Image (spheres, rainbow, N blue to C red):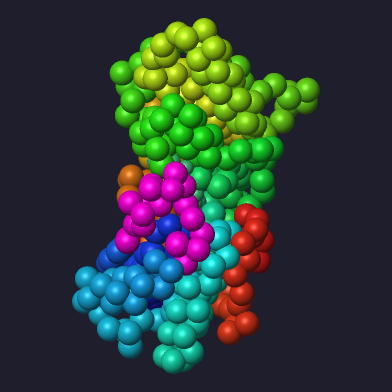
Amino acid sequence: MGKNIKILAIESSCDETSAAVVVDGREVLSNIIYSQIDIHTKFGGVVPEIASRKHIEAISIVVDEALKKAKLDLNDIDAIGVTYGPGLVGALLVGLQYAKGLAYALNKPLIGVNHIEGHISANFIQYKDLNPPFVCLVVSGGHTYIVYMKDHGNFEVMGQTRDDAAGEAYDKVARSIGLGYPGGPKIDKLAKEGDEDAIKFPRANFHDNKSLDFSFSGLKSAVLNYLNQKDMKKEDVNRADIAASFQKAAVSFLVDNSIKACKLKNVNRIAVAGGVAANTYLRKSLIDAGNVNGIDVLFPEFILCTDNAAMIGSAAYFEYKNGKTAGMDLNAVPNLKIGER
Ligand code: KG4
Ligand code: ZN
């Protein structure tokens, strides 16, 4: 065994400024997350310009804190990992320029990380013996994918959303019933008090029923139509029932396609990643379906589901091991696709 590789990782793709130190892709020495959510809540969603400014204010503090917590200084670090896409361009650029500056000044390798692949890597931190291949359900605020991870850096997209992402649907439905941003955790909580069979919200149906794609915009519209009809009739609505019924429709879609994907690939293991992986109803429903079908269901702990730099440090390590370092010309790629380099 060679020496342990310590990566300082930086994440700033959306509204969390985060820095972490991760050893050999699996062991987290620190994972500092500065969330801007309180500021964006006032506007009902992430305001890109504010996000960039807040990242600039926080970045050096967060990086210093990550090193301090790991009891290391910059000279102990072997490489710098950083998210370069997908995400908000102005937000990405803050972390990226900071990481480039560090890599240049220290003369250490720079590793560009795909944020979505970072989410998947949270599972390598959680499950120390986990290695590809496995099926992964990626459900975040901006992305919804079912992928087959053949190897590190090698992904086959089996299904994806044709419109809204799962987290986006949660956030939009939450807003429509006055729950505010970010809506996912609020729906998760409120739904526990509601009846999931109270309202029958439809699920998208594709003509090609072999497809593992998703669509959530019809479901969102169905909730809006329901609210409008109730409003016109001057009838009260039960927000907990709406939350629970919406969630049942959305989660059953995610669960059914996930199980289908495992069967197609003949694998008995599925990992889940992204902010919506923190959803308690999804966790329970997928584990139940896994039990019925003999499939192990893996979830990272809550803090590793939503945006954080530890997952970026993990993904960076596997890139580094594959010799995939970046040059000083690495740029932010707001629409970076999974598996793209
Ligand atoms: O992965 P993430 O932190 O950021 C992106 O890369 O998009 O995901 C954020 C998304 C938001 O849409 C948020 O509402 C959703 O994850 N989310 C949840 C829960 N916690 C966060 N959705 C449902 N239930 C939750 N408990
Ligand atoms: Zn994310």
Residue drawn 42% across and 14% down?
Answer: 237
Q: Position of residue 329 (x, y in %)?
A: 62, 82
Q: Is residue 166 above or below residue 36?
A: above
Count of numbered circles in the view: 0
Q: Position of residue 178 (x, y in %)?
A: 41, 30
As for residue 51 lying within the magenta part, the answer is: yes
User: Which of the two residues, 114 or 153, is positioned nearer the viewer here?
Assistant: 114
Indicate left or right for 296 with 61 as reference: right
Q: Is residue 112 above or below residue 277?
A: below
Indicate left or right for 261 with 26 as reference: right
Q: Tell me which segment is drawn in magenta.
A: 33-52
User: Which of the two residues, 162 or 297, is positioned nearer the viewer here?
Assistant: 162
User: Which of the two residues, 126 or 51, is positioned nearer the viewer here?
Assistant: 51
* Extreme-right residue of the structure: 207
Residue drawn 48% across and 89% down?
Answer: 104
Residue drawn 36% across and 37% down?
Answer: 185
Q: Is residue 149 above or below residue 286?
A: below
User: Which of the two residues, 313 or 201, is positioned nearer the viewer here?
Assistant: 201
Q: Is residue 334 above or below residue 58?
A: above
Which quadrant holds residue 229?
A: top right
Q: Position of residue 208 (x, y in %)?
A: 77, 25
Which quadrant holds residue 298?
A: top left
Whether residue 229 is visible to the viewer of this picture, yes or no, is yes
Whether residue 322 is visible to the viewer of this picture, yes or no, is no
Residue drawn 34% across and 70% down?
Answer: 58
Which quadrant holds residue 73?
A: bottom left
As for residue 306 lying within the magenta part, the answer is: no
Q: Position of residue 81 (x, y in %)?
A: 46, 72
Q: Quadrant of the C terminus?
A: bottom right
Q: Quadrant of the N terminus?
A: bottom left
